[in-house]
Amino acid sequence: MKLILTDYIASLKEDRELDSLLQDLLREYDFEIIYGPQKGVRQYGVDIYAVGLDADDNQKKVFLITVKQGNLDRKNWQGSVQALEPSLTEIATVFVRNNLAPEHRTLPIKIIVAHNGVNEPAIQQNWVAFTEQYNQYQFSIWQLETIVNMVHDRMISEKVLSDEGRMMLRKIIVYLFNPDYDFLDYKVLLDEILNQFIPEEKGKKQNIKLLRKVTLILSIIISYCEREDDSRLGLKASEITLLRFWKLINTNEKLIDKDYFNEFIHMLVIRKNVTLLYLSKILPVCEIKDGFSRHSGDSVTYNMITYEHLGLISLAGLEFLQIGELYENKNDEVVTTLKEYALRCAEGIINLFNNNRIVFNPRADNQVIEINLAFILLMKLEKQNDIRTLLIEFNNELAHAKIFLNIAPLYSNNIDEIFELDINYKKRQEYKYGSSSLLTTLTEWGISINDPKVYDAFLTLIKNVFTEFDLTLWFPDSKTEDSLYTQCALPATGYCLSNIKLTETFEDFKFLTLVDHIHNCPEEEYLFIKNKFWSIGLIASRHYRTYVFPYYWRQFIENSCPVSVITSPEH
């Protein structure tokens, strides 16, 4: 375990990584964090200001910590604005005199240099001379080995992780070389840790520490994913963690307060960082003609890879918008930045569609999940014209594939059968596909963007080309939320409407769909929707392959259809 921790901690950047870990570590020792690093605020050399008991003598002290990345050597001792000696001098001569809280002025002061490297012998004389010059204060250096030991003893101890749990963590890290790794071991490990959650108010302190350990383990896993140059796996690990965390929130709703929620936000920030890394690598690929065909030996693999990235990019944009909503009326700069990230994602998915035409021939019915994620993002960014264009392209390409090749989305979503149908021409020519929720959903999107021409195009397509298809649509029920966060919620929960008939007119179908949405939407009572954390349901759909709730696209119908239509005497 110490080797894993050493690798992880040594890789941390000073800004928002190493200092964040140190703050969590201090909290494990029951320190009070007065403040941590702050952007745009001069801190006179102090990155972390904390108060707590010194383990060396069990005495309460003020800890003033300056955080540096890498080794402590002559190069970073002097000679630049970020050098260590100027920071220490500012702490000793300015901060202590002017910035200590009145209630802390009588406490002993300990100045700490924390860094994730080694102390090189060349600076030993400089260090001794400096500490003797300011001998009214106590000094200490927490180098890499020191921090590793502290984290190991307090955050990954046998009290939290059993021997089996530690073995699983090592196993997870070894398996990260495999791009198809399913993270089953990680799910078991999370359950082992979170089963220690105490569902009582008196357990809050212990519970918060437990959640910080989960965050640490996720951060370690993501750092190894980055080493394997597979941030996609890091996204998957963070999806699992966020959903497990939200299940905990959902189950213990009455216990959850600001402190618990802050830990959830911390996890969102970690996911945001790995998302940005993923996007920096994948968005340029979207601009390349057939960019996702690389390493794909056949059309089915190319199709599956393209859809996976379509879902990840779309979900990234939606999560940026979600986080932006949390900061509305609090930090306009953050909201603007997140909106720009979301717009980049929208541009990326348009490029993906334009350069990877295979995406217009979905091979599995549940690929409508990714289509929904893309359309919801575009809709939230008011790009209805792009959705309209894409729907017409889907209509044309679905017709072409069915008429000339008898290729259509497979309702069973069985990947082996999809491959067999692709290579076995005779079987494909005689194959009866049976049902489709993808066609139903695309038709309803014509209603969501309020476009009669799109609706008529799909009505014609289904009447003339997909004549033998049974149109279906899955809906969640009151039991769905219980299983949504850890598995595919269907068919065990919810219900599926079948034999859906389209009306001859756009307005009739719009009316019927809106009435059904208003009177048949139990998911509006789900905790994540009531609390405007709507992205949770979409993360669950992408990860565990539960169909996206119709609520997500039907809500847009309300914006284009006045309530008065519901009581119209014509209907």
Image (spheres, helix red, strand yellow):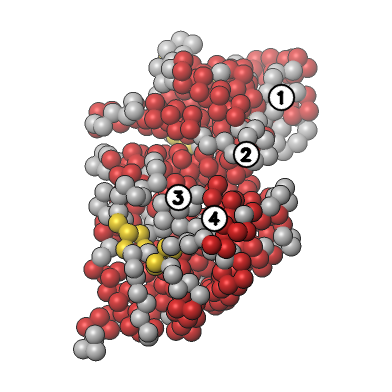
SS category of the residue bearing label 2: loop
Q: Position of residue 290 (x, y in %)?
A: 72, 60
Marks 3/2 in contact by CB < 8 Å: the verdict is no
Q: Quadrant of residue 342?
A: bottom right
Label 3 and label 4: CA atoms lie apart by: 11 Å
Which residue shows up at 31% across the image and 74% down it? 514
Q: Total number of numbered labels? A: 4
Q: What kind of residue is marked 4?
A: Gly
Kind of residue sitting beneath label 3: Arg
Give the CA separation, mark 3 to mark 1: 46 Å
* Numbered disc in front, either 3 or 4: 3
Q: Mark 1 is on which residue type?
A: Asn
Residue extending farthest to the top is 57
- The earlier-in-sequence mark between 3 and 2 is 2
Q: Residue tagged by mark 4?
A: 311
The kind of residue tagged 2 is Pro
Question: In this rendering, would 13 be left or right of 415?
Answer: right
Is residue 5 in view from this perspective? yes
Relative vertical location of residue 319 with respect to residue 557 in this rendering, above or below: above
- Work out whether mark 4 precedes mark 1 in sequence or the reverse, and give the earlier one: 1
Residue 49 percent coordinates (x, y): 50, 31
Separation (CA) of disc 4 from disc 1: 41 Å
Instruction: Decide: few, some or many residues near mark 4? Use Cα within 10 Å; few <14, some 14-19, many ≥20.
Output: many
- Front of the two marks 2 and 1: 2
| Front residue (pair 78, 218) | 218
* Residue 545 numbered mark, or none: 3
Quickly name the residue at label 1. Answer: 71
Q: Secondary structure at mark 4?
A: helix
What secondary structure is found at the residue carrying circle 3? loop
